[in-house]
Image: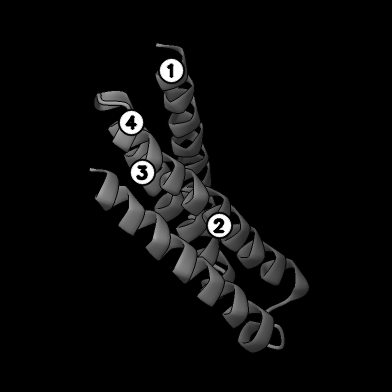
Amino acid sequence: MDRTFLLVGALAGFIGVAFGAFAAHALRSRLSPDMLAVFETGVRYQMYHAFAVLIVALAAARFDGWMVRAAGWSFTAGIFLFSGSLYALALTGITTFGAITPLGGLAFLAGWALLIAVAIV
């Protein structure tokens, strides 16, 4: 499982860097400043949580149990839901994508809470 999360974290980081460059170079002239800021927020949280998934990969090599795996999948779901909904909102202007964003935030919080539990138990 640690290799799975190493792969997921590395892919999320790679895509985050690519999306950040895309925003800086291709989207700057195409999006309003507000929507560019929304897109960049998605990139920022994706990068934070790419590192979180990499931490899970390290933790999975040391700690066994469902909580470590659940933390990794929670962070992964959060990246898709939180960052993905912000990307969709910024690129399409469809505001209903913004309703998905808090679900991703809850997934991020669940991942961090699970890592706290792993550290305590």
Residue 121 placement: quadrant: top left
Q: Do the residues labelled 4 and 2 touch (CB within 8 Å)?
A: no
Which label number is shown at residue 62? 4
Mark 4 is on which residue type? Answer: Arg
Q: Which of 92 and 114 is in front in this view?
A: 114
Q: Position of residue 65 (x, y in %)?
A: 25, 24
Q: How far apart are marks 4 and 2 (CA)?
A: 23 Å
Disc nearest the viewer among 4 and 3: 4
Neighbourhood count class around disc 2 (C-alpha, 10 Å): few under 14, some 14–19, many 20 upward: many
Name which residue type carries label 1: Ala
Q: Which mark lies nearer to you, 3 or 1?
A: 3
33 over 77 or under it: above or below: below
Tell me the amino acid under the disc marked 3.
Ala
Horizontally, residue 31 falls left or right of residue 107, namely right
Circle 1 sits on which residue? Answer: 117
- Residue shown at 45% from the left, 27% from the top: 115
Which numbered marker is on residue 22?
A: none
Which residue bears the numbered disc 2?
47
Say whether disc 3 or disc 2 marks the residue closer to the N-terminus. Answer: 2
CA gap, disc 4 to disc 3?
Answer: 9 Å
Q: Which numbered disc, 2 or 1, marks the residue that appears first in the sequence?
A: 2
Q: Distance from label 3 to label 2 (Cα)?
A: 15 Å
> Going by the image, does 25 lie left or right of 109?
right
Res. 29 image quadrant: bottom right
